[in-house]
Image (spheres, grey):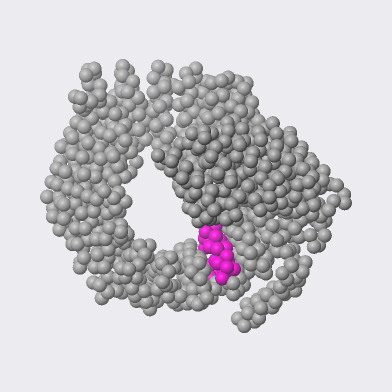
Amino acid sequence: MANLQMTGILEKMTGKDKDYRYMATSDLLNELNKEGFKADTDLEIKLSNIVLQQLDDVAGDVSGLAVKCLAPLVKKVSEARVVEMTNKLCEKLLHGKDQHRDIASIALKTIASEVTAISLAQSILVTLSPQLIKGITSPGMSTEIKCECLDILCDVLHKFGNLMANDHELLLNALLSQLNSNQATVRKRTVSCIASLASSLSDDLLGKVTVEVVRKLRTKGAKPEMIRTNIQMIGALSRAVGYRFGPHLGDTVPVLINYCTSASENDEELREYGLQALESFLLRCPRDIYSYCDEILHLALEYLSYDPNFTDNMEEDTDDESHEEEEEDESENEYTDDEDVSWKVRRAAAKCLAALIVSRPEVLAKLYEEACPKLIDRFKEREENVKMDVFNTFIELLRQTGNVTKGKIDMNESRQVSVLLCMENLPYIKFIYSNLSCPRWLLKQEVPKIVKSINRQLREKSIKTKVGAFSVLRELVVVLPDCLSEQIGSLIPGIEKALNDKSSTSNLKIEALTFTRLVLASHSPPVFHPYIKALSSPVLSAVGERYYKVTAEALRVCGELVRVVRPDIQGFGFDFKPYVRPIYNAIMSRLTNQDQDQEVKECAISCMGLVISTFGDNLKTELPVCLPVLVDRMGNEITRLTAVKAFAVIATSPLRIDLSCVLENVIAELTAFLRKANRALRQATLGTLNSLIVAYGDQIGSSAYEVIIVELSTLISDSDLHMAALALELCCTLMTDRKSSPNVGLAVRNKVLPQALTLIKSPLLQGQALLALRNFFAALVYSANTSFDTLLDSLLSSAKPAPQSGGVAKKALHSIAQCVAVLCLAAGDLKCSSTVDMLTEILKDDSSTNSAKQHLALLCLGEIGRRKDLSLHANIETIIIESFQSPFEEIKSAASYALGNIAVSNLSKYLPFILDQIDNQQKKQYLLLHSLKEVIVRQSVDKAEFQDSIVEKILKLLFNHCESDEEGVRNVVAECLGKIALVEPAKLVPALKVRTTSPAAFTRATVVIAVKYSIVERPEKIDEIIYPEISSFLMLIKDHDRHVRRAAILALSTFAHNKPNLIKGLLPELLPLLYDQTIVKVIENLFFFELMMSFMRCLSKYSGNSGLLLELFNLSCLL
C-alpha cells in the first residue's frame, strides 16, 4: 500500500502542472521524514533520480522543496545511492547549465551537512574531493564555479577535515595557488578554506603554509590587494589553530607591524587586517606573543586616534553653557565622508588593545600609565560604533583591575602608597604594592579625567553614546566603590537628563538607574544629601514608567534612596521629612496595582518594607492602609516570599513600628507557611518569626507560641541541617522570651526535645546546626522549665547504642560531649563541678564493659575543660593520662584530646605537665604530642599568643622529635610547628628555614610539611613573613631524598590551593623541577597527575601568564 502511494507521488512529481509538482514534492518530503519509511533498491533509484530531476525544475519553489527532500533522503537510502547522487551533483556543478549551478551547490552542501556515518563520509570524499579540486584549479573554470567549489570545500573541510589527511598536501597546494587569483571573491573564499583545513593539518603542513604566506608578504613589489589577502590569511590561520601558531610568531609579527607602520595613507584595510591578526595572536598565543606586547601596545595606541581626514583642533572642553555645547556637537558632526574608512583602523586598534588588556593582566600598571589616558581622550571619538568599542576596551581595563585586585589590600590613597614606598625593604610589601594595589591606585588618580570626559558624552544627542557612558560609570563604581564622592555633583545633570528626556529609550533609562543604584549603595549617604531633590524627582517619575524593567529598576533605586535619605534613626544634619510622602506615594501606587509584572510586584513589596522600617514614625496615619496590603501579598503564592522578607525588615527596624493592626494575622500566616514544601519560604519564615518574636513578643499570645513549637518540631532533622539550625534558634528565642508561659516550656520538652536528642546522634551534625543545638540545651536550663539532671541523663543516654544499631558514630559522641559541656556551664559552678566528679569516677572504673562510658566521659571532660578551668579538681590530669593505658584505641585518642583541651583553660599549670610527660614517657609520646597539638591548634584558632619561655620549650621539644623514626610522630610534630607558626610567625619561619639545610632528611621533610600546615586560605600574619623565604622550602623538590621531595610537592599543592599569589613568581623555576618528578615510578606518576590537575584548577583564575597553565595542561596529557 505504501509503495502504491509512493508511486502515485512520483508520477505527480513529473507532471506538467507546477502546482501538482509542488504538492507531490511536499508529500514526498512528509513521507521521507516519517521514522518508519523504508525503500527497496528500485525505489531508492527512483527516488534519487526524481529528486535530482526536481532540482532543475523551472519553478523555484519546487526545486527548493527538492533540496529539503535531500536531507532525509540521504539517511534513508544506501551508501551507493548517496555517492551516485554526489557524483551527479558534482557533474551539474562543474559542467551543467549556469541556472542550475546554484541549486547543485546548495544540494551538495545539504548532503555534506547530513552525513554522519564515517564510512559514508569516506566514500563520498573519495569522489567529491578530486572534483572540487578540479573545479578550483582547472584553468577553464569560471570565477562563479570556483567560488561555489570553494564554498562547498570549506563546509566539507570544517566537518571532515580529519578524514582527508591523505589529501591534505594536495588540497593545500591547490588552495595556496588560489591566493594569487585576480578575483577578490576567490581569494576571500580561499582564505576561509585554508582556515578550515588548518585545524586538522599536521604541524609540518601548518608550518609550510605559514612560511609560504610570509614569503609572499616579504616579496617586494607585491600588489596591495595580494598583501591584504595574505595578512587576512595569517589572521585566519591564527584564529583556526590557536596556540599551535605560537612558534611562527617570530616570522609573522615583525612583518605585520612593518606593514601597519609603512602602509600608504589610503590603505586603511591593510592596517585593519594587520591589527585584527595581532588581536588574534594576543588572545590565542598569549605565551609566545609576550615579547612583542610593547610594540603591539604602541601600535594600537598610535592607531586608536588614526584619523587622517579630520583634525580636531578643539582645546580641552570646559563646563560651558548648554547652547555652546550643542553648537560644538553640531560642528563636530558637520564633517561627513562616505568614502572615509579610517574608522575601521581605529576600531581594530581598540579591539587589539582590549585583547592585550584581557590577556596580560600582569602589565596593568603599564597600561594605566600609557593606555588609560589615551582611551579616556578617545571617548570623544566621532564615529559612534568605534566609540562603543573604545568604551568596551576601557570597561575591560576596569574589569581586569577588579579581577586582579579582588579581595586584596586597597591602597588607593596616596598617603598609604607613600608609606609603602618608605618600607621597600620589606619584599612582601613591595610584592603587594607592585602586583595588586598599584592598578587601583593609578585608576583612582584618573577618576576626575574619566568623569570629565564621560560628562561630555552624557551631553551628546546619541542615545547609544549615553548608554555606553553609563556602562563605563557602572563598571567604575563596581571596581572602585566610593570613588565618585567628589564628582557626584557633576554627574547629577546627566542622570536627570537621561531619565527626564522624552527621547530617552528604555535601555538608556535602565543603564542610568542601574548606575544610580550602584553609586547610592557604594558611597556615604552625606555625599548625596545636597542633590537629593534633583535626584529623587526623576527616579520617582521612573517608578511610574510603563515598561516593567524600568519600573523595577527605579523601585530598586528607591530602596537605596531611602537608606541615603535617612541613614540612621537620629537623622542629624539632613531634613528627610519632605521626601517621605513622595517616596511612599510613588511606591504605594505600584504596590496596590495588581495588573503588572511579577518583578515589579516584588520590587514594590521589598521597597515598601524598607520605607516602613525607615520612615515608619512619620507614616503613622498611612500604616493602617499599607500594612494590610502587605499581609494580602502574603496570601498570594507568587509574592508571599517577598512579603515575608519585607516583614522581616520591618521587624528589625529600630523604630519599633506599630504592627498591632496586622500582627495576629501575620503570625498566623507565617505559622502556616512552616508546613509548606517551598524550602526558601520556610527558611525566610523562620527568620521573620524570630525577628517578630524578639521585637513584639509581648504582643503575641502564648497559644501562638505553642502552635509555632508544634510546627518547628517537624523541621528538626539531619535531612536539612540549615533548616534545623533556624528552627532551633527560633525555639531558643521562644524560651528566652520573658512572656513565655510554663505551657511553652512543656511544649518544647514534649515536641522539640525528642527531635533534638535524635538529631544529636546524627554523624552529619556540624557547623551552625551544632551551634544552635548547643544554644538550645543551654536555653532549656536557663528557662528553668527543665531540670539539669534530667537533661544530662537524656544526653548521656543518647550515647548508648540502640540494640539494632552498631553503635553511635564517633562524630556524634563529640557533638554530645559539646552539648554536655554547654549544659554544665549554663547550670552553674556547682552543677558543673558535680558533673566533672561524676565523669572522673567513670574513668576510675577499669571494667572492660565500661569502655563506651569512658570514651564519652573523656570527650566531655575535654569539652568542659576547654571552656572552664578544672584545676580545682585535684589530679584530674593524672586520671586522664591513666587512660593512655587502655587497650582501646578510641579511648586513648579521647584521653589525648581531653588532656590537650583541659590545658587550654590553664596553660601555666597543665602545659608544663604535658611537655614533661613527652620528655619522660617514650611509650606515650605519640598521644602526648596529640595533646600538645590540641593546645596549639586551639591557641591558633583563638589568636592567642604563648609566653616566650613556653614557646622556646615547645620548639626545643618539637625540633628534637623531627628525626623520629615513626612517621606518625613526625606528622604530628609538623602540624604543631605549622600551627605555632600561625601564632608566632616571626620566630618560627627563620627557625624552619635554618633546618631546611639539616643533614637529616626527616628533619628537612618535617619542616616542609610544617610550612604546609601553616598555609591556610584566610589571610594571616605569616604570609608577609614567609613570602621571601618560600623558595627555601619549595626548592627542596630537587632534594635527593624521596620523603623530602614528596613533602615539598605537598606543600606546593597547598600553596597552589590557598595562596597562589605567593608562588606565582616561582613557577618558572618550580615547574621544570616538578616535571622531572614525573619520570620516577608509575604510582608516583598518578600522584603527580592529580597534582597537575589541581594546579590547573587553582591557578587558572590567578595566573597572569597563560603559557604556564598551558605547560601544566600539556604535562597532564603526557602523563
Q: Identify which residue is drawn at 56% across, 24% down.
A: 1085
Q: Identify which residue is drawn at 23% across, 53% down.
A: 673
For this rendering, which residue is in front, 861 or 259? 259
Give the quadrant of the N terminus: top left
All told, the count of numbered labels is 0
Q: Magenta segment: does it hold 467?
A: yes
For this rendering, which residue is in front, 846 or 295? 295
| Residue 720 sits above or below residue 1003 on the image | below
Quadrant of the rendered image containing residue 601: bottom left
State left or right for residue 722 relative to residue 400. left
Q: Position of residue 505 (x, y in %)?
A: 51, 71
| Residue 1028 sits above or below residue 101 on the image | above
Q: Identify which residue is drawn at 31% across, 70% down.
A: 593
| Residue 738 sits above or below residue 195 on the image | below
Q: Position of residue 549 (x, y in %)?
A: 43, 65
In this picture, which residue range is highlighted in magenta? 463-488
Q: Magenta segment: does it hold 145?
A: no
* Extreme residue toward the right, this view: 221
Q: Position of residue 442 (x, y in %)?
A: 63, 58
State left or right for residue 905 relative to residue 493. left
Answer whether residue 45 is visible to the viewer in this image.
yes
State left or right for residue 1060 relative to residue 869. right
Q: Position of residue 320 (x, y in %)?
A: 63, 80
For this rendering, which residue is in front, 371 or 262? 262
Q: Identify which residue is drawn at 49% across, 28% down.
A: 974
Give the quadrant of the C terminus: top right
Q: Main secondary structure of the magenta part?
A: helix
Answer whether residue 843 is visible to the viewer in this image.
no
